[in-house]
Image: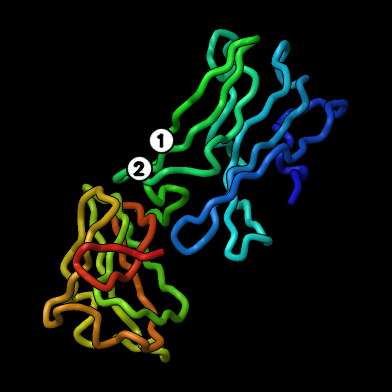
Amino acid sequence: MGADRLDNPPGADPGDLKAELYNLDATPYESLMLGLFTIWHSSGRVAKQSKINDVGLGFSRDGFHWDRPFREAVLSVSNEANTWNFGNVQSVGGGCLVVGDRLYLYSSGRRANEWSTGLWFLRRDGFASMVSGERAGTLTTRHLRFSGRRLFVNLEAPRGGLQVEVLNREGRVIAPFTKEACTMVTGDRTQLEVRWGGAADLGQLAGEPVHLRFHLKNGALYSFWISPDASGASHG
């Protein structure tokens, strides 16, 4: 892994040194690896800021090949000289902690000769979402095989709603798991169960190749998973 041209800040001076990968902390997170990429930038970006580091995110399924779909810092330096994270931020603790509905990310921070510890908060699974407005949108998964029974979603839709239908390999809806039979899911929570009238759960489809099709209006879908029981445990 290494930094690339997308890590250079917008408007960087052509004479500045190119961005470099300073450190990578990686930790298991659900079904993948979460990487905290500390990126070093040229100290010429802002006057009197020395050793500018900030931290972005990356994702891997095997620990070797990494995707970094966005380069905005999640643990960032400040341009204000009197702030604790003025010059240098680095991830600490090897990753993040899952605490209820939030992720806790710890970092070091530096200002002149002062060192501090920072605590940053992120919504659980809040790295990315599929968003729909007044015009409802749909999202269809690729083929899935699951061993659980109950479908859960991480959803932000206090003024909207989500419905789900299940399709077979040929793309035909499997009754009774239709959109019409699906109870509208609303609210803003990291764990909401999806239910259908006429079926206690998805257990009868376990092991079969299926698609899930999500219908969303006025909301953001962060993640979904199928749990073996009503607790909603994902087991990674």
Q: Residue furthest left?
A: 198
Task: Name the kind of residue labelled 1 in the image.
Answer: Phe
Q: Position of residue 107 (x, y in %)?
A: 53, 30
Secondary structure of the residue carrying numbered label 2: strand
Question: Number of labelled discs?
Answer: 2
* Mark 2 and mark 1: Cα distance apart in space: 6 Å
Count neighbours of disc 1 (C-alpha within 10 A) and say few if under 14, some if 14 to 19, many if 20 or more: some
Q: Position of residue 76 (x, y in %)?
A: 57, 29
Q: Residue furthest front?
A: 93
**Depth check, front residue: 155 or 77:** 77
**Image height of 191 relative to 11, above or below:** below
* In the image: residue 17, left or right of residue 180: right
Disc 2 or 1, which lies upstream in sequence?
A: 2
Secondary structure of the residue carrying numbered label 1: strand
Q: Residue at x 31, y 66 (%)?
A: 215
* In the image: residue 204, left or right of residue 236: left
The way the protein has been coloured in the rendering is: rainbow
**Depth check, front residue: 214 or 68:** 68
The mark found on residue 121 in the picture is 1
**Which residue position is annotated with label 2?**
102
* Contact check, label 2 and label 1, Cβ < 8 Å: yes
Q: Position of residue 68 (x, y in %)?
A: 62, 51
